[in-house]
Image (tube, coloured by chain):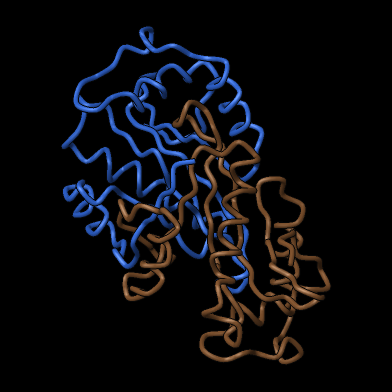
Chain colours: A brown, B blue
Amino acid sequence: MILRPATRAELPSVLALLADEDRVVDPASVPVTEAYERAFADIEADPRNEMLVLVDGGLVLGCLQATYIPGLGKGGAERALIEAVRIRADRRGGGLGRELMERAVARAKGRGCALVQLTSNKQRTEAHRFYARLGFARSHDGFKLVL
Amino acid sequence: MILRPATRAELPSVLALLADEDRVVDPASVPVTEAYERAFADIEADPRNEMLVLVDGGLVLGCLQATYIPGLGKGGAERALIEAVRIRADRRGGGLGRELMERAVARAKGRGCALVQLTSNKQRTEAHRFYARLGFARSHDGFKLVL
């Protein structure tokens, strides 16, 4: 099992994961629009963004996006923002989420990040316990403004 | 009054704002370390990061960092993350915070962002009311892991 940046060929699998709420979505059924292709190319070309996939035997089991943010806090170190964390619906509950997160955190640390941050919808209390078990502090409130 | 990316000459003023909790900090008293210079240069060179300053008559009244994040949600549109929001201690309470945020939100919208997001420490209830008045929904919990 490895964690690495997704390839363009895996974009349908990643979009299927992001569309997957409670059941596995067939990647062949997900429309890969030009806007998604452009966004994926933007992520791939940006040295501070990665769409990471957890892959086992060619199968994409999970994903997350990491954004490495330069800043003037933390003694000038980067911080990592994690978004779009997903594990395939039929592979949950077996520790893959922990595997995915721990590898992403190690990757951020290896890069020199001083902090990893993420937000989780207030209704997702199970996810909150998961992040707490990984050592995250629920210290902030997350605000969103749709434009 | 304008909102624009900070210049290198304004870095001490920005660091003074970030060090400013309840009283104005003299920019001349703030050590500009190599690490901060490097971080500032990284922000300046990155087309998806901006250290924005609200300036009036040459005086830096406030700042925030905006990070524009490409992603596979929101139909492939960017989202803006706002961090390090500060108004000079001696100029608070006069609407400058709203001015700063509204201009930053308009800038994100002009760029095509679908969403603006930020986190605020759970203890800062006054800031939470401020963001709510600006239309932000407090829908998420924010998690941090110090590395």
Image coordinates of residue A16 in percent, x first then y, are 66, 82
Tell me which corner region of the image, top left, top right, bottom left or bottom right, holds residue A62: bottom right
Is residue A99 placed above or below A103 in the rendered structure? below
Name, please, the residue furthest toward the top. Answer: B28
- Residue sitting nearer the eye, B5 or B123: B123
Q: Relative to A29, is A122 above or below?
A: above
At x 81%, y 75%, the residue is A57
Q: Residue at x 36, y 67 (%)?
A: A129
> In the drawing, does residue A104 fall left or right of residue A12?
left
Q: Pinpoint residue A15: horizontal percent, then vertical percent.
A: 67, 78
Residue A114 or residue A16, whichever sits in front: A114
Expressed as whole percent of the image width and height from the top left, the position of residue B59 reads 35, 20
The quadrant where residue B30 appears: top left
Left or right, residue B6 beside residue B1: right
The N terminus of chain B, quarter of image? top left
Q: Which residue occupies the foreground of this view, B112 or A107?
A: A107
Q: Position of residue A20 (x, y in %)?
A: 58, 84
Q: Is residue A40 left or right of residue A126?
A: right
The residue lying at 22 percent from left, 47 percent from top is B127
- Residue furthest to the front in view is A94
Question: Residue A25, relative to residue A54: is it above or below?
Answer: below
Q: Residue at x 74, y 59 (%)?
A: A4
Q: How many marks?
A: 0
